[in-house]
Every structure is written in C-alpha cells, then in structure tokens.
Image (tube, coloured by chain):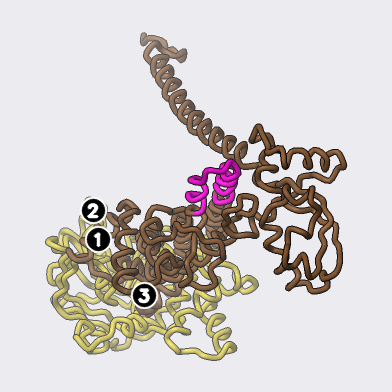
Chain colours: A brown, B yellow
Amino acid sequence: MTDRISLTPSRHLKKRYRAEKRFKAYCVGALVLAMAFLVLFFTDMIRQGYSAFYETQIRAEVTYNEDTLEFTMDSVSEEVFPLVSRAFFRSIPRQVENNPELMGTTQTQWLTAKADVDQYRKGHSESLDPEMKAPLEQLQADGDVGYGFNKGLFFSGDSKIPSNAGLWSAFVGTFYLMLVVLAISFPIGVATAIYLEEFAPDNRFTQAVEININNLAAVPSILFGLLGLAIFINFFGVPRSSALAGGLTLSLMTLPVIIISTRAALKAVPDNIRQGAQAVGASRWQTVRDHVLPLALPGILTGTIIGIAQAIGETAPLLLIGMIAYIPDAPGSLTDAATVLPAQIFTWAGMPERSYVSLTAAGILVLLSLLIVLNATAVILRNRFERRW
Amino acid sequence: MRTRDLTGDTAEMVRTPTTERPPVRQATKMQVNDLAVWYGETQALHGVSMDVLENEVTALIGPSGCGKSTFLRCLNRMNDLIQGVRIEGEVTFDGDNIYAPHVDVVELRAHIGMVFQKPNPFPKSIYENIAYAPKILGQVRKRTDMDELVEHSLKRAGLWDEVKDRLEMPGLSLSGGQQQRLCIARAIAVSPSVLLMDEPCSALDPVATATVEQLIDELKDNYTIVIVTHNLQQAARVAGYTAFFHLGDIVEFSDTDSLFTHPREKKTEDYITGRYG
C-alpha cells in the first residue's frame, strides 16, 4: 500500500505562499510610494500655480484722446490709476495704432490690476499700500473688482512687471528649438541607424561606433552645452542665445536617443521579411525602404518624439549658450535671441516678487502638460500603426 | 528511359520514369561543382557536386544540420547575407558560374526564386505581395497588365478562388497554408526559371501540405524545382530525383524510386528506414 496523496498544502508549500505574499507586498509598497510622490508633486504644483491662471481685474472707464495718448496715466480716473498694471498704460499707443476708431471715445473695460493688488486679493500678501487699499475697497464696494482669465500668461512675453509676465516668447522659442532639433537629429539619426543596422559590416570599427553612441546617450547634458558653446558659437559663429544654437546643441543630445530607438525598431523587424524581399530580387535599399522601414516606423516615431520631449525639457546645456536671458519679445527668426519654457521657469524661480512664485508653478504645469501631450502622441502613434497588420 | 545518370553509375541502375510523359533527354539547369561552405570556423559543406535537371523536381533530404538548407541557399546566393560565410567551388546556372565576379546577385535572384520554411508574406495587401517584385524589376508597368499578372500568378498557385474578392486584404490575414501559396505565387510572378523551396510544408497541416504538393507537381512543367524536406514521403511523392545529405556531404543522389527502393549506401538505407537521423 502506498501512502494516500494529500492535496491540502504542506508546511513547505505554505512557507512558499507566505514568501510570495511578502514579495507581492514589497512591490505594491514601491508602487504606492512612487504614486504618492507623484501625487504630492502634482498637488503642490497645482496648489501653487493655479492662482496664476486667473488675475484681478478692475472695471474702469478708459478715455482715448490726444492728451491721454501722451500722458497715458490720465486715461483713467485718479482712484483707479494706482491699482492698474503699468503694462496697460504702456499699451495704449499700440491699442490706438491697431484700432484708430478708439480715438476720442471712452470705453468701459476690465483692466489687469497691479501685481500687489492681485496678490493681496488672492491672500498671498498680508498688507497693501494704503494709497491702493482705500480706492480698492471703494471699487470693491461698487462691484468694479473681479477675477478674469490671465490671458497674459499665454499671450505676452516675459516682463519685469509681474502682472504682465507670460510664456509667449518661451513658447515661440521652444517651437523654433523643436524645429531645429527635429530637422537635424531625425534625418541624421535615422540614416545612421539604418546604415549601422542594415548595411554596415560587423567589424571593430562599427562596434566602436556603436559603443560610442551608447555612451553618448549617458553623457551629462551640461557637457553638450560646453560642446555647443565651443563648436557652434565660438567656431562656427552661430549667434549666441539663438534658437539655432540651442537646437544644434540639443540635437547632439537627441541624436543618440533617436539612433538607439531606431536601431531597436529595425532589429525588431523579422529577418524573414528581408530575406523574402531579397529572394524576389529586391536590392538592399529597396528591401529597407519598402519593407523594413514601414514596419519600423512606429518605433522610430516613438523614439523621436521621446527624444524631442527630452530636448524641450532640457535646461542645463542652454545655460551655457546664453538661452537663459531675459527675452520679453518672441523671436522672429532662428537667429534671434530666444528663451525656452524650462529656461523661463528657471528665470522666474529666481525673481523676488511673490507673483513669480505662482508664475513659476504655472509654467511648470504648462511644460508638464506639453510633455504629457507629446508622450501620449507617441503612445497613440505606436498603438495605431501596430494594429494595422 | 532517361539516359542521364546523375551518380556516375551505369545506366542500368536508372529506374522507370515516374511520370506518364514519354521519356525525354533533359538538360542540366544548374550544376554544382565541388561546393564547400564555411560558417566562420565550422565547415557546413565539404565539396559537394550535383546536377539539377531542367523541369524536374529535385528533393534534398537528410537529418537536421546535414547541410541541405545551406546547399539550397547557395543556389541563389542567399548565403551571401550571412556574416562570416565563406563559399568555395562553382555553381552554374545555364552554364554561367553564379559566383563569378560579374554576376549581380539581385539579377540572379530574379531568375532563381525562393520559398521559405515559414510563410513570410510582406506586411502588405495580397495584391501588393504579388505585384511588388514585377514592379521593382520593371517587368510590368501598366495597371491592367499587373492585374492580369496577379490573377495569373494566384491561379498558378491555386489561391485565386480563395482570395479573388479580397485582394486588398493584408497577406498576413490568410491562413498558414494560404500564406505559403501566396509566397509561391509571389515567387513565380517574376517568372523565374528555378524555384527553390526550403521545407515549404513544415509549418502546414496535412490538407494544406497536399495542396502545396499538388501545386509543386503542376509547376514542374514550367519550372525547375529544388526542394528541401524532412518528410520522406513528400520527397517520394513529388520529386523525380533525390539527394541524401549527411554531415555536409551528399551520400547518395539518384532518381527517387531507386533511392527509396534500392539505396546503394548503407547510410541511406538506415536513414530512410528510420534507423537514425
């Protein structure tokens, strides 16, 4: 007689189950911790930044005539004047230029308030100059003070007047930078990867190139800034602080990312597709162009977008090539002085006024949203093309 | 009665013809002389010689790793794609050495088609799969001619009736057997004169295998076919001539009937009776 086999868990098995549970608990713990940091970061940014998306506005009658064009402070009443942002008065000549019909009229408008007033109303500062406090209370009682969407945050450039500071010039700079990076690193990176993966013989030279490219991806980004300064600005004479100089420098950084991801995408294409194409008389280039590249494209695009997203979030190399300057006006061309979103955030983070704290956080939120959109595009592209066959 | 003796033995050994056709004197389509292949340090083929007869099916059998696939891939220079391969000897195609310096591989492969072990249709539509090669080789320019060629090739491969209503569907949406026939249709679309098949049925079920075998039988009137197979019955069914490979050498090469019924070598007999391999 053999012993009856017992199907209830033995002591040894129970021990294995306990170990399994413990391991699972560690993993869940790690996940919870990571999520907690993320949530903490986001809530803090939103808490600090949300107030920069709206602004205090004051309803006032604005008079446009020959006198107020010259002495713009006379365009509003004496009580309102100390409360309104200086940026508004500076803009009066431009308003009239754009819209000549305004001349000789009086308009009721909601005007952006001074940063001091704004911060006081939002509860960020305790005290307000009595000169402003009295008229503010008066206007508040009349219902002429309210909140409105802060258009300036998106549509005006950087400014030393906090109520007028915005991200527009940084947007344009980032856009130009992205164009340069894309135009340079995409074709060069993809072509390099195709050569290395599909045509190059496997010898010492190509192995050395491969190792170097992989190392390049791990080089601290500030070194790329030094390289850009030495080569593009000092040697080739590209204008300092320009989107062109920044784009060229960041292209160096993006290139290895694109090369590595393109090679991985090409490697993932099954070899029998290549053999099938060559067996019917396709040349090597025809094989790559007609069969391998279409299959590898989603992977290549994903890698490129992630590389670009990395580049537009990069600040360190740009410090060295002067892209961290005060740039109130959006650049008109690739060679104009420009700033980019992360550099703008860096600049604002160093400003003393209370308004810039909210602006910094708002800038971070905008940059993060942009990066999330880019990465989501990469994921969507990949999923869409992968499903096709 | 065939008079050509492929093994160097006397004509008495040659069997009765496998087909009903009157015996004809067949031309040699490809001739392999003293072919030796190294992959790095390992020698895969030790100087083998063999003739491939025109409009005939030649089967290559033998245990795994015996060099039959290597041999096959030397016939259209697919081995050139492998890193560190070294090939010596001569392979002639209609009398020209295909390893001569003036020979262009891309041109050569348009004349010697290949069907692989695993069906490998292009990730494109059924139509595009067939039309691709004639298009890039500049054989067909007009759309109407192309439509005709696609239909003709699919009919030759016995696939037309199954796919004629969905030519725009991806080739990969077909079943395994259909995919393999699509690959055959793709290979014959450029009208090669030789068709190499590397275990074309190993990934197919018996029904699909029977279809492909029947197809091979029909195709041999127009093409010279060399087929590698692990399935001895398949070799017996489709091939007029069979070569038995072992450890990088051809042990025996003769017409299929005598190889299977009166093998001259002990090794061949052991293999076909299932004693080893």
- At numbered mark 3, what does the secondary structure look like: helix, strand or loop? helix
**Chain for disc number 1:** B
Q: Same chain for marks 1 and 3?
A: no
Q: Same chain for marks 3 and 2?
A: no
Distance, label 3 to label 2, CA atoms, is 30 Å
Residue A299: x and y in percent read: 46, 59
| Quadrant of the image occupied by residue B169 | bottom right
Of mark 2 and mark 1, the one earlier in the sequence is 1
Amino acid beneath label 1: Gly
**Residue A269 falls left or right of residue B75:** right
Per the image, the residue denoted by label 3 is A279
- At numbered mark 1, what does the secondary structure look like: helix, strand or loop? loop
What segment is highlighted magenta in the picture? A344-367
* Callouts 3 and 2 close, C-beta under 8 Å: no
Per the image, the residue denoted by label 1 is B62
Magenta highlight on residue A70: no
Quarter of the figure that contains the N terminus of chain B:
bottom left
Magenta segment's dominant SS is helix
What crowding class fits label 2: few (fewer than 14 Cα within 10 Å), some (14-19), or many (20 or more)? few
Per the image, the residue denoted by label 2 is B277
* Callouts 2 and 1 close, C-beta under 8 Å: yes
Tell me, yes or no, if residue B213 can be seen here.
no
Near-viewer residue (B242 or A83): A83
Residue A53: x and y in percent read: 67, 47
- Determine the residue positioned at 36% across, 75% down: A278
Amino acid beneath label 3: Ala
3 or 2: mark nearer the eye: 3
Tell me, yes or no, if residue B15 can be seen here.
yes
- At numbered mark 2, what does the secondary structure look like: helix, strand or loop? loop
**Residue B256 falls left or right of residue A352:** left
Magenta highlight on residue A351: yes
